[in-house]
Amino acid sequence: MKDVMGIINLGESEENIKALTYHRPIASIPYIGRYRIIDFIISNMVNAGIENIGIFTGSKFGSLVDHLGSGKAWDLDRKIDRLYVLSPEFQSLKPFYQEGDIRNFKDHLSYIKKSRQEYVMLSKSYMVFNMDFKDAVEFHKDSGADITILYKRVTEKKDFFINCDTLNLDENKRVLSIGTNTGSGPCPNISMEVYIMKKEMLVNMIEDAISFGDANYLKEMILKKIYDGNTYVNAYKYKGYLACINSLMNYYVESMEILNQENYQELFTGHGLIFTKVKDEAPTKYSDSCSVKNSLLANGCIIEGHVENSVIFRGVKIKKGAVVKNSIIMQRSVIEEGALIENVILDKSVTITANKHLMGDEKSPMVVRKDSVI
């Protein structure tokens, strides 16, 4: 796959997940104990042999740069072809996803043109999955299509893909149109927002959008190609585990779903390893007073209380007599003695003082912002 470059475009709507994106993009939200959302798409690309990966950021890229570093965790710290983290040249007062992503593609057009690969794979970060991209690229090449879009047919949990793109296909998997999933109607073909095409086609679409000024989003240019009748756009079907992290509710539910052993195995022991930034931690210490049921705990924790149906990140301390149920506790948080946490998401480095009770609802979890003391 040395002839394919990857571009991860972080122009993603944060409207429904603002509680976790005040100071970070969706891509760097902590996920499943030790990962960040973006780890999955980067790992999929690296596992397929893609060595040139560009990440087009928005304005909140500090935590992302800190997490990605030189790309060493993904073996992308190279002299020729590597990980490029590219911020927009012009900082608008509007969020990136409201301005449109064509501007960011324009800012980095020279990077795209100078890359030596013939093909490009475009993606977002908010779709979490583990798949072999090699098969999809070979399918694209063999089909003779100009553009291939990856999708999954969702027969269950379609309410967890609200506002995602849907593909309307003919019997030969040719894309006829792109719609939006509203949660009603038949089982939708959910676009994973992964596109494969020749680099030349991408460059032409960007330059046309700039010249004519009739599109703010790359997706609009792809729609024009679908409707012009001269461009063959087809679809590649993915059948594995897929989570969409585009809302707070989805983040909470999908984090709880990963406690299901079948989902965990499918995501982490599927087609390749999921890599992330390595942080050396001591093993988690479980005291005689603790009890842990159906939970996922990272390294470096000290557990003295009760933990049930929860995801616990690195370095968390849960003191004696504290109870944590159906919750997500991010890095370096402390739950003092006698505290009760249920249906709650604690962002990084939160302290819950002794005997404090915090209870959300399973359909509307409570969120406590980073560095808070309650």
Image (cartoon, rainbow, N blue to C red):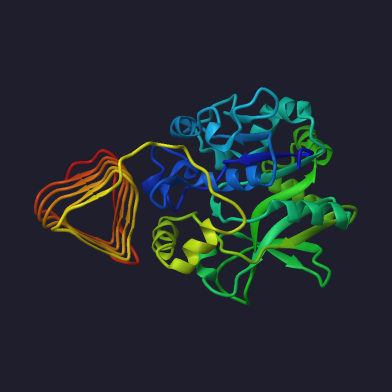
Return the x and y of residue 340 as percentages of the image width and height.
Answer: 16, 59
Q: Quadrant of residue 240?
A: bottom right
Q: In which quarter of the image is residue 257?
A: bottom left
Report the residue at 60% width, 70% height from top: 154
Report the residue at 78% width, 62% height from top: 175
Eyeballing the image, is 72 above or below 339?
above
Residue 174 in sight here: yes
Q: Is residue 18 left or right of residue 198?
A: left
Q: In this view, does 128 lie to the left or right of 291?
A: right
Return the x and y of residue 167 as percentages of the image width and height.
Answer: 70, 63
The residue positioned farthest toward the bottom in the image shown: 186
Return the x and y of residue 63 as percentages of the image width and height.
Answer: 43, 33
Eyeballing the image, is 200 above or below 228?
above
Residue in front for this viewpoint, 245 or 239? 239
Return the x and y of residue 364 as percentages of the image width and height.
Answer: 33, 62
Q: Is residue 83 left or right of residue 14?
A: right
Residue 359 in sight here: no
